[in-house]
Amino acid sequence: MADHPIGIFDSGFGGLTVLREVAALLPQYDYLYLGDNARSPYGTRSFQTVYEYTRECVFKLFDAGCPLVILACNTASAKALRTIQQKDLPKMDSKLRVLGVIRPTAEVIGNYSISGKVGVLGTSGTVISGSYPMEIAKTFPNVEVYQQACPMWVPLIENNEHMGSGADYFVKEYVKQLMDQATGIDTILLGCTHYPLLADKIQQHVPEQVCILSQGEIVADSLKDYLHRHPEMEKTCSKNGTRRFLTTDDTANFDAHASIFFGSDVRSEHCSIPRVS
Ligand code: DGL
């Protein structure tokens, strides 16, 4: 069978926390991961820049044979997905698809909350886009959404400093800023695929009963459902159980850090991203 892996994209390492859960639930498929480490972080970049970078990486994954690409990055999902779907995909092979991580998360998050008050921690880009409050309101109009941008977290995580005292300070600070916005927040979404690495630290700064949600399992369940509802796509995706990893930056550095996110050893290949005008 020809090689048609499912593409998983992130600005850097964070999407590996999603791939980990997706591959655990759906091990039969081939996966091609692309981390744009050379240009990460995306979280503080403009809409236009995030769109251009994301589009180039999506095209790279299409060129590599992926019929379906998951933007395993909230920032890219918030700032680039809709434009890619509306502007770029109609000009391409009609069978190609790009999906994000915000909608599947927004469609279930209200089920975790009893108080109806949900906190979202994300990059500045995700928070400013307003994507979460907008998408959550479609499924859960009565849920109140409070957001907090955490611009220092991705740099700390990408530099492997997330276990240190610098991380302690910034975790405490941003979590306090979120929890101070309202009493009764009982569910906190880690709305950035890097943040699961900070979940234990975050838990230390909130009451025990607060549910801290990572997206990996949610996205995995949603992909399983998508493939079930789209048998033509399901048939196209190749099933040899392979995992390949591409990075736009140094492979030795990628491999040294990636296992923390992915949970097992990773051997990456370098790739360059052609500019798309
Ligand atoms: N992991 C990405 C996300 O889910 C953001 C990381 C970045 O700032 O590049 O938003």
Image (tube, rainbow, N blue to C red):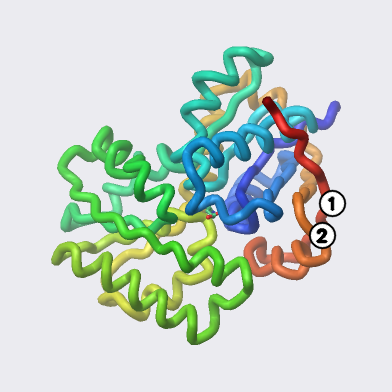
**Residue at the bottom extreme of this rendering:** 165
x 26%, y 76%: residue:
207
x 35%, y 47%: residue:
128
Name above or below for residue 174 compared with residue 17. Answer: below
Q: Residue 60 appears in which quarter of the rendering?
A: top right
Residue 140 placement (x, y as % from top left):
23, 40
- SS for dot 2: helix
Residue 95 placement (x, y as % from top left):
65, 17
Badge number at residue 269: 1
Left or right, 52 with respect to 149, comes to right
The residue carrying pointer 2 sits among few (fewer than 14), some (14 to 19) or many (20 or more) residues within 10 Å by Cα, namely many
Quarter in which the C terminus is drawn: top right
x 48%, y 43%: residue:
46
Residue 201 placement (x, y as % from top left):
43, 77
Residue behind mark 2? 251
**Mark 1 touches mark 2? (CB < 8 Å):** yes
Residue 214 placement (x, y as % from top left):
45, 58
Name above or below for residue 63 compared with residue 180. Answer: above
- SS for dot 1: strand
Left or right, 6 with respect to 269, comes to left
Residue type of the residue flagged with mark 1: Glu
Left or right, 237 with respect to 138, comes to right
Chain-order first, disc 1 or disc 2: 2
Depth check: give the residue in front, 115 or 162.
162
Q: Work out how far the residue at label 1 is from the one at label 2, CA to CA, in angstroms.
A: 6 Å
x 41%, y 56%: residue:
122
Residue type of the residue flagged with mark 2: Thr
The residue carrying pointer 1 sits among few (fewer than 14), some (14 to 19) or many (20 or more) residues within 10 Å by Cα, namely some
Quarter in which the N terminus is drawn: top right
Depth check: give the residue in front, 172 or 56.
56
